[in-house]
Image: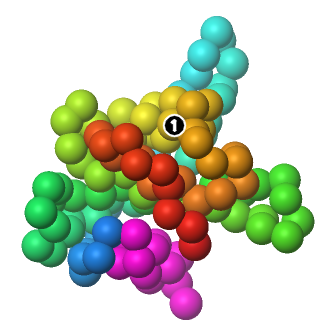
């Protein structure tokens, strides 16, 4: 399965809608002069989602050998209006998540906890 298809499957599972890949966006986030995130965010068009027309998604590598990767999806709902802001939201959500850090993260403007893979 391709990387894009893998992310589309996660979007389907987490948000219940089909998606089409739009573009790959490089994002680098720094804090205090240190790089805290550097990667590619995939942007998708969402078909018939009740709140968002786009989503951002990527895979985060974990230190857990039993679960080596974590899928992150962020809906394009203000204040999330770009790939860079989606990464910021995911970072903040990771710091304040109600689930352990090794669990998959779904980030949006609501306060629900994240779904499991």
Q: Is residue 35 above or below residue 20?
A: above
**In the orientation shown, which residue stands out farthest toward the bottom?**
1
For residue 3, above or below residue 100: below
In the depicted view, which residue is nearer to us: 6 or 77? 77
Magenta segment includes 30: no
**In the picture provided, is 112 more to the left or to the right than 35?**
left
* Residue 23 visible in this rendered orientation of the protein: yes
Question: How many badges with numbers are in the image?
Answer: 1
What secondary structure is the stretch in magenta mostly built from? Answer: helix
Q: Quadrant of the C terminus?
A: bottom right
- Toward the viewer: 23 or 76? 76
Q: Is residue 15 left or right of residue 61?
A: left
**Residue 70 placement (x, y as % from top left):** 64, 61
- When asked about the image quadrant of residue 110, the answer is top left
Query: How dense is the environment of label 1, judged by Cα within 10 Å: few (below 14), some, or many (20 and up)?
Result: many
Say what secondary structure mark 1 lies in.
helix
Residue denoted by label 1: 93
Write the residue at 37% across / 41% down: 111
Along the viewing direction, whichever of 32 and 17 lies nearer the viewer? 17
Residue 20: x and y in percent read 25, 75
Q: Please tell me which residue is depicted at 69% across the width and 47% down the height of the picture.
A: 101
The N terminus, quarter of image: bottom right
Asked if residue 40 can be seen in this view, the reply is no
Q: Which residues are magenta?
A: 1-14
User: How is colour applied across the structure in the image?
Assistant: rainbow
Q: Position of residue 55 (x, y in %)?
A: 29, 57
At a point 65% along the width and 57% down the height, the residue shown is: 103
Q: Would residue 10 be counted in the magenta stretch? A: yes
x, y percentage for residue 84?
39, 36
Picture layout, residue 115 above or below residue 91: below
Q: Residue furthest top?
A: 32
């Amino acid at each position: 399965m391709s990387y894009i298809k893998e992310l589309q499957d996660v979007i389907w599972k987490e948000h219940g809608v089909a998606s089409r890949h739009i573009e790959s966006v490089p994002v680098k986030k720094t804090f205090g002069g240190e790089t805290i995130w550097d990667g590619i965010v995939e942007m998708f068009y969402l078909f018939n989602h009740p709140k968002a027309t786009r989503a951002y998604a990527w895979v985060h590598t974990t230190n857990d050998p039993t679960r080596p990767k974590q899928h992150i999806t962020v809906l394009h709902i203000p204040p999330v209006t770009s790939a860079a802001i989606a990464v910021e939201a995911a970072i903040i959500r990771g710091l304040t998540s109600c689930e352990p850090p090794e669990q998959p993260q779904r980030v949006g403007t609501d306060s629900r906890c994240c779904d499991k893979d």
